[in-house]
Structure formats: C-alpha cells, structure tokens
Image (tube, helix red, strand yellow):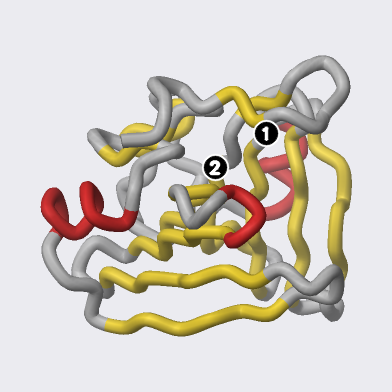
Amino acid sequence: MDVIPHTGIGDIRLGSSRESIATMLGAAEKKSRDYHEDGEHSEVWVYRLLRLELSFDSEHDFYLSHITSYHPYTLVRSFNPIGLEEKFLLQKFPHLDLDVEVSTEEKYFTDKVLDLTFGTARGKVVSVTIFPAYDGDGKQVLWPAGPS
C-alpha cells in the first residue's frame, strides 16, 4: 500500500466523497463518529481487512480528509515504517516532531514536510496517517484531484 503524501494511499484519494469510496471499497465494516472540541465532527469508516481508517470531516463537507493505515505493508517513499523502532523512525524521517504524547507507550510524530503522522505504541510504529496539503495561509485545502 503506497502512501502518496498529500494525495492518498494506493487508489484511495483524499477529497473523495463517501459515495465514491463506498463504490470503490464497498461498505465499511464499522462506522463511528468522533466529536472534536471545536464543534466539528468526523465520520470514521473502518476497513478491517485493508487495515484502514478513513475519516470524512464535517469541516470539509464530509470529503475524505485523512487516511490512517495500519497495514503491515504500508510504504512511504518505498520504505515500510510499520514495526520500525521509534529511534530508527526519527533517523529515517528527520523532519519529525513529537506532536502528541498520549502516554509513554503511545506517541504521534508528525512530519511537517510530508504532512504524515506516524503513530507509535510501545516504541514501534503502528500507523501512518495521510493529510491533504493546504494553501500558504493554511486555511484552504488543496485537494489532490478535487472532490469526487
């Protein structure tokens, strides 16, 4: 599963509608809602066999806003970070900043250049999250191919 920063993973593109994703991947095994402090919310679709979570955010009119892969064959620039120890992740991706430290066991590192977040558990990478690009002001989303 090739991660394309600011674009998507494989054939799944950020900015896609829920309908186009359902047509492409079928029904999600699980759907839930996440509510945010700012009043916005996300509809999260889980595809267990693909090991993907797709988030459709209200602030983006429920277009696909970010993709999280837990798949063991996730590739970022032809490199598989899943299972990598945290110290080696920091060596491989020098633009990482510790974004959130939930506990000593769970951390999230963000690469500001690639707009990717790497989730770690017990010192090893367990997920990669892909986000769209934004304009210079950081207010307007630059969807890769426009919403479908």
Q: Between residues 99 and 42, which one lies in front from this camera angle?
A: 42
In the displayed structure, 117 sits above or below 36; it is: above
Sequence-earlier tag: 2 or 1:
1
Q: Residue at x 34, y 48 (%)?
A: 17
Q: Distance of mark 2 from mark 1, alpha carbons?
A: 7 Å
Residue sitting at 36 percent across and 61 percent down?
Answer: 52
Relative side of 16 to 19, left or right = right
Residue 115 tag number: 1
> Residue 107 appears at what percent x and percent y?
77, 65
> Quadrant location of residue 105?
bottom right
Closest to the observer, 11 or 84:
11
The x and y percentages for residue 129 are 56, 50
Residue 34 x %, y %: 61, 79
Q: Mark 2 = which residue?
A: 130
The image shows residue 83, relative to residue 73, as above or below, that is below
Q: What residue type is labelled 1?
A: Asp
Residue drawn 42% across the image and 64% down it: 53
Q: Quadrant of the C terminus?
A: top left
**SS class, disc 2:** strand
Does residue 148 appear in this view? yes
